[in-house]
Image (cartoon, rainbow, N blue to C red):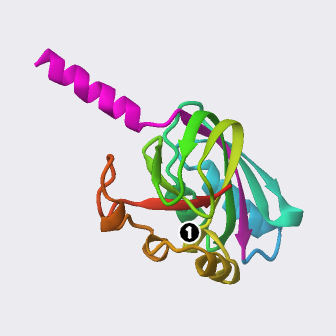
Amino acid sequence: MRKISMIVFIVLFALQSDAQFSKARLQATGLTCAMCSNAINKALEKVSFVESVRSDIKNSAFDIVFKKDADVIIDMLKDAVEDAGFFVGSLHLTGSFSEVKIDPDKYLKIGNANFHFLNTDTKVLSGEITLKVVDKSFLTAKEFKKINATAKAPCLQTGKADAAHAGNGIEEGDRVYHVTI
């Protein structure tokens, strides 16, 4: 029994990447005034894993710092913006990576989230890296149309893992975030 527990621990540890997100830059759409920016700022500050938010009113953007070692749930950022009555125009996540290998058309687990790197070659990520989330609800319609035309990923439309990519700790139907570097 002890051997089985140790094997399970090692397998689960191997499936987790050595990466953690520390901050994000979110650009919102639909803002018309400083009160709009304030509404989004307050909504983002209420998200449990957010430590601080700084507004960039000129660019309709928000610099978000995450609490250390917190589980970052990306959809909660989008939901906060939408609950305030606006939309996400772009989201860039920055984190520290330590020898994390990415392969074309493969999923990678970072924290509790699954990521699908689009339009990339095999590479190893080390140091501070910024990823752009390119899912439909994290881009303008025009920009998503461009990404969708270049990516050959059926899961990009649904945001869910498909049968072809199930395995290695990811099941068909699991939430997947599509990103570019």
Q: Choose top left, top right, bottom left or bottom right for residue 68.
A: top right
Magenta region: 1-29
Q: Is residue 32 left or right of residue 133?
A: right
Quarter of image, res 178: bottom right
Left/right placement of residue 149 relative to residue 127 reads left
10 Å crowding of disc 1: few (<14), some (14-19), many (20+):
many
**In the picture provided, is 30 more to the left or to the right than 56?**
left
Q: Residue at x 62, y 40 (%)?
A: 124
Q: In which quadrant of the rendered image does the N terminus lie? A: top left
Residue at 45% in and 68% down: 159
Which residue is the site of mark 1? 135
- The foreground one among 102 and 116 is 102
Outermost residue toward the right in this view: 58
Q: Is residue 58 magenta?
A: no
- The residue lying furthest to the front in this view is 122
Residue at figure coordinates x 33%, y 33% from the top left = 12
